Amino acid sequence: MPRDPASDLAGKSVLVTGGAGFIGSHLAAAMTDHCDVTVLDDLSTGEAANVPEDAEFVEGDVRDSVDVEAAMDGADVVFHQAALADVRTSVRSPVEAHRRTASGTVKVLDAARREDARVVTASSAAIYGQPDTLPIHESDRKTPTSPYGIDKLAADQHTRAYADLYDLPTVALRYFNVYGPGRTDGGYSGVVSAFLDRARSDAVLTVHGDGTQTRDFVHVEDVVQANLLAATTSDTGQAYNVGTGTGVTVQEVAERVTRILDSDSSIAYGDPREGDIKHSRAAIGRARSQLGYEPSYSFGDGLETLVERASVTN
Ligand code: NAD
């Protein structure tokens, strides 16, 4: 049987902010057999039902230092997932997005400094903006195009600065487009679940633009794996891309989804989304060599697993 990377955290107290959300709930569930897991979430987009039974749930806000310090009491490792994780909402409400994503991260890092807890933060491919070349390396130019991407870049840099200035062991993980069970809407990983939902009822799948735009779709279990590795690495003070290293077109997503479900859905083409980047693909050599990260799902395998699981639970 393969070794469970969460076993390296055996006996630790861990805090997952945003643990009632999509990624945070998978991460929390992966650790409850080995660790004391606390989830801090304000349920702004997450749901209490997503929090694993064996985790302690604290309803609170990462913008509030009192909530953060109380939830972090005794924590050895903090996985900071809480954010306003939607690009379009950040464009509509940049002040709110800034408070949740950028200020929230500084509050979490600062409480961790007092607690001397390691911090792994959820950064994003959105910090790179339009790439000059592919694949995207961690050191490439960063020109984010949305308030979300700008706030994530600030959070990512604060994470590094806390390691440089205060010797706090921190890691920023730059997720590409995460998909998997429990993901419901929004952005370019939401496109997988949105297409699956529509294809199940033979509804039209609408592609924004001509469908040739590519994204690096990474399965949530691989994102969990990267977090667990980041929680024990000695290579802290660094940022790591978390993707698969492969680009998939949105057209291919639509075609694979209809094929796999044997759906009669047709594909329609709408206006491109304003500010959308054309291509995105992660260079994952740094995560491979320094964290020992190895994605276990190709997009095709990940999609099949997602469909199989949904048919078991429905
Ligand atoms: P999500 O919306 O499902 O989860 C975010 C969680 O944070 C929610 O449960 C929400 O209620 C909580 N939250 C928001 N503001 C909060 C606050 N002020 N205090 C406490 N809790 C708060 O989103 P997700 O897809 O699970 O994203 C998790 C993290 O990963 C986010 O930081 C996001 O920016 C990052 N990320 C996600 C993707 C992706 O494709 N899903 C890609 C790159 C980065």
Image (cartoon, rainbow, N blue to C red):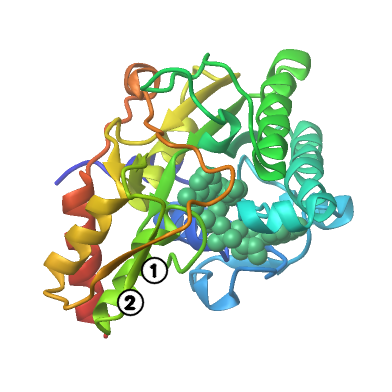
In-front residue for pair 25/297: 297
Question: Dividing the image into four equal quarters, which quarter contains ligand 1?
Answer: bottom right
| 256 horizontally vs 188: left or right | left
| 100 horizontally vs 49: left or right | right
Position of residue 110 measured from the top left corner of the image (x, y, whole percent): 81, 35
> Which structural element holds mark 2?
helix
User: What residue is at 43 percent from the left and 37 percent from the top?
Assistant: 278
Q: Determine if residue 302 is in view.
A: yes
> Which structural element holds mark 1?
helix
Q: Determine if residue 12 is in view.
A: no
Task: Classify 167 as above or below 171.
Answer: above
User: What residue is at 44 percent from the left and 40 percent from the top?
Assistant: 176
The quadrant of the image that shows the C terminus is bottom left
Position of residue 107 measured from the top left corner of the image (x, y, whole percent): 81, 42
Marks 1 & 2, CB-CB < 8 Å contact: yes
| 245 horizontally vs 51: left or right | left
Disc 1 residue type (three-letter): Ala
Position of residue 263 measured from the top left corner of the image (x, y, whole percent): 16, 76
User: What residue is at 37 percent from the left and 36 percent from the top?
Assistant: 243
The image quarter in which residue 71 lies: bottom right
Disc 2 residue type (three-letter): Arg
Position of residue 235 measured from the top left corner of the image (x, y, whole percent): 50, 17
Instruction: Say which residue label 2 marks.
Output: 198
Instruction: Say which residue label 1 marks.
Output: 194
